[in-house]
Image: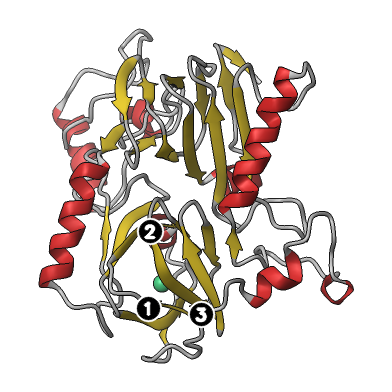
Amino acid sequence: MSKPDAVEPATVHNAMNPDETPELRQLYADFEAGHMMPLWTQIGNLMPKHPMPRAVPHIWKWSDLYPLAKRSGDLVPVGRGGERRAIGLGNPGLEGRPYISPTLWCAIQYLGPRETAPEHRHAQNAFRFVIEGEGVWTVVNGDPVRMSRGDLLLTPGWNFHGHQNVTDKPMAWIDGLDIPFSYQNDVGFFEFGSEKLTDITTPQYSRGERLWCHPGLRPLSGLANTVSSPIGAYRWEHTDRALAEQLKLEEEGYPGVLEKGHAAVRFVNPTTGGDIMSTLRAEFHRLRAGAVSAERREVGSRVFQVFEGKGCVVLDGVSRILEKGDLFVIPSWISWSLQAESQFDLFSFSDAPIMERLNFDRTMINGQLS
Ligand SMILES: [Fe+2]
């Protein structure tokens, strides 16, 4: 049995590395035959000094993604069985799996004119973020939710959902889910629902929004906390105003921004003040032109999509130019910093609720643990 190389440089003498003898070789061969693996030959791989992700930082250009999604629309019909015309982004470090990180799925989904994606439900939590376009409604447990530019829509685990495009134009958006986490931990369930949408009306606001989306007001019929947010869509007009006000407060000399020139908000469950769903965190960041964010490292993985503006991200010391729609992934403990050339708006999602719930969360800002 060959001994795997340790990830860490051999700076520490391994006191458990005796000279090879026929007896030692036989011992390792017997381990292998018995499906056993000694810790002492691979401790560096199993327990590195800090996270050593197999996933790598990577950028997908919207200018590459959208034409490929459109070609899928020309060639592949959407319907029962395949369920969605969604194309997952596969991290180059994760051996051909459709995972953007070990825990997160991110896909571009494309729905052509007048198409319907049938209803189904699954244990996996999901959201949609709309970079451009309109004309699609997502029906979540019978509640039609309009999808428009800048909106974040939730379909928490085990809620039936389907999509319909009521216009003559195609629409594309990104899907974020916890599929890799679910797959690797064998927690997934799936069920088909109605092939036709259970409600084909197209209201301006969903029933969930009409009940819940009034600042600081909670319906007395909804005092029980829920694991996932009851809000079907977080509208761009609210997100935009919240970010703009943070920057205005900064101009007036008041606190509110995350750091100099950097406004940021988190989308939360109004019943708990916590994350929108048990496995996924979503945020929106806005940097003034010329602003530079601190250098951060975080346990867990995070994905950004540029919503508007131009700038750079420095990933593990390498600067990359970003434009509208570009997506990038930051694997665990990879350093990152944003630099804004113009006003720079970015949507972000991560697996932070998992890491925090399990007490694995750790953040380093400008070299200091926070
Ligand atoms: Fe789904």
Whereabouts is ligand 1, in terms of quadrant?
bottom left
Q: Residues within 10 Å of mark 1 (few under 14, many from 20)?
A: some
Residue closest to the eye, 343 or 67: 343
**The disc labelled 3 sits on which kind of residue?**
Thr
Residue sitting nearer the eye, 45 or 369: 369
Of 32 and 110, which appears nearest the observer? Answer: 110
Label 2 belongs to which residue?
A: 133
Quarter-of-image position of residue 205: bottom right
Residue 143 in the image, given as x and y percentages of width and height: 58, 80
Mark 3, residues whose alpha carbon is within 10 Å: few (<14), some, or many (≥20)?
A: some
Image location (x, y in percent) of residue 173? 36, 58
Q: Secondary structure at mark 1?
A: loop
Whether label 3 touches label 1, CB < 8 Å: yes
**Badge 3 is on which residue?**
202
Q: Provide the residue designation for mark 1.
A: 166
Question: Is residue 174 rendered to the left or right of residue 140?
Answer: left
Looking at the picture, how far across and down is residue 95, in whole percent? 20, 46
Total residue callouts: 3
- 337 w.r.t. 96: above or below: above
Give how far across and how far down residue 76 sits, in percent. 14, 73
Mark 1–mark 2 Cα distance, whole angstroms, equals 12 Å
The residue under the point 41% across, 25% down is: 334
As drawn, is 76 to the left or to the right of 62? Answer: left
- The C terminus - image quarter: top right
